[in-house]
Amino acid sequence: MKTLSYHHFIFLLAGLLFASAVNAQIAYMHGSTYEERSHSLIDQMLQTQPVANGNIKYVSPFYFARLWRDYEKEKAIEKLTEMYQYQLEHVKAFYNSGSDMDFFAHATMHGYMLTKEKMPDSLREKIKAFMEIGKYTRDNGTLNMKLMHQTSGLLCAEEWPDFTDADGKTSVQLKEFLHDRIVHTLKQFITHNCPEADAFTYLGTNLQYIRMLAEFSKNEEIRKSALAAYHHIVAQLLLPWNQGLYCANPPRCKGWKNLYTGNLSTGVQIVQLTWLFYGSPDERIILREAANRDNFGCFNFWLAYERTVKPLPFLQALNNSKSYPYDFKALRIDSKHYYCRYTYQSPNYGLSTQTVEAFPDKLKDFQYTYAFKETKNIHLVWQSDNSEASVFSVCHDNPERPQIYQTHSNKLGYGENPYHRVFGYEKSAIGVYNVTENYMNIPHFYQMYVPFSRKGIKKRMVKKINGLQWILCHTGSMMFAFATPEEWAFEISGGKYDIKAHDVLILKDKKRRRGSWVLETTEITEQYKDARRDMKAELENLANDIREKVKFNCSGDYETSETPGISYTNLQGHTLELTFFSPETAYNGQYKLNGNPVKLNTEYISQSKYMEQKANSNVLLFHTPEGTKSWELE
């Protein structure tokens, strides 16, 4: 059951939103079930006028939705015809459009299969002609890019026996080339987790082509494998979802703003995607952006239209039965490495940490791989009345493309430094870093920086407690405290790490490559609560508790060893220890909890009191109030 404090917060939040709506129109989607929420999303798409001259990726779903609902059909046919005629007249530009080729292929074929009976012959022929300028046997690109064009090519081959793509591949050749590759990938998603699971932008991009196959492939093996992968991915969204928050460590995240996965998030695709399946306590969500570029409908429409494929019927009830707090372990297995994740879900916030580890035969030069380009080792997100400011993470300068030894810094909040180790348990997390001097052979990629939102954090104070300078933060719904033993200062604006509306902690020693930090989080419990709800007083209460209970120590060789370490005793009396180990070194008990080495989770794709799935298994166990349900994905 949800706590009274949470409902009280939602009530206050609703009042704030109502007041702000006086000056700005806020559009919502509503619904208490998957069907109602999906219907509401498509209703909003029909009420939205797409931008003129919009492209296939972002705008065509709004016209396919109109065909699907028999709404403004003539206009939809006219606009789609114009879109595809333009592409046929600008083939060179299409080939030079990068990933748009893949997104265009998926949106076109998915929309065609969904609405072809509602199209005139002229539009069907134009779409076929457009698909014939595609190239569908390419194995390059990111996971979602590759699979979007390969799955679309497969459906072309199934739909049109006389189909030939731009590389001269016939329908027979395409089916022969693509079938086994697609089936293998789908089955890997089930037993190893999708490598882009929890990717705040790209998980939905994968799920849309999976649903397309499950709905429309004529090959029974592919259709069944896709349906199983669909159910697996939707089920895995259950645990990171926290009453409108999405808390996880993304394998792919597009910078600081892409970490905003809070209850009012409008800029991150995964929040609205998960809301479709699981809803939120107030049964509504703010629309994302308008129908020009990345928007609320361009990807989610492909998961929202009602046809044959839909979530397992008991999942929303299981989500609604969750009680807080709870924690869970999760695992993503890629070809060369794996991500071991731990998440603590509290009534008003979530805290997630991870370890990225190479397989033993892949440890050499692991720091120069794509694994670190877009991931995040720590993610704290909380309930807030501000849609774009309810996140905290510890960041490090890192190369934009480590896999090609690139010398440019990544965008702010984008990616992870390979030499940053993080260990989390329940409400606390600690980190140690030690960036080797020859990393990329230039002295750029080592500086720690920590953004503090001026909007999402309602009250902030700095206090020296037992020798550490603590930054104590009150968000209105929870509190957290951060400290580092290194000397630091706030970079207000204008520096390298300047993020709008944030004060950014940076080290005073700009050449320092080693250091550590600790993070403590808490609900505003009775022991901290002030009778007048004065935030400063509540932070003082937290500071006093830290003074009495917390202990922090650096290892004796902290400044000289290649493996510096720290020990931290948190407010609950648990002692977390972390000894640094390089990305080329295998984990071997460098995390300790209360003196005992922690075993990294390499056994379970997900493990919690609500659901579990072992790695290399296709069986999901759901622990419902009525008992355990076993679901075999085949």
Image: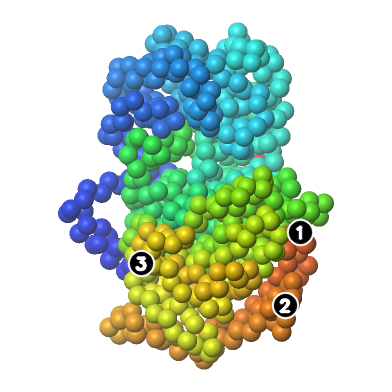
Q: Which residue is mark 3?
A: 454
The CA distance from mark 2 to mark 3 is 36 Å
Q: Looking at the figure, which quarter contains the C terminus? A: top right
**Relative to 487, is 616 on the left or the right?**
right
Q: Which residue is mark 2?
A: 560
> Are circles 2 and 3 on residues that touch, CB within 8 Å?
no
Q: Which residue is mark 1?
A: 584
Q: Label 1 amino acid?
A: Glu
Residue occupying the far right of the picture: 361
Q: Is residue 4 among what the camera can see?
A: no
- Which quarter of the figure has residue 41? top left
Above or below, 82 relative to 521: above
Image position, residue 403 (x, y; %): 67, 46
Q: Label 3 amino acid?
A: Arg
Circle on res. 64? none
Say which element carries label 1. Answer: loop
> Are circles 2 and 1 on residues that touch, CB within 8 Å?
no
Say which element carries label 3. Answer: loop
Above or below, 479 relative to 357: below
Q: Earlier in the sequence, mark 2 or mark 1?
A: 2
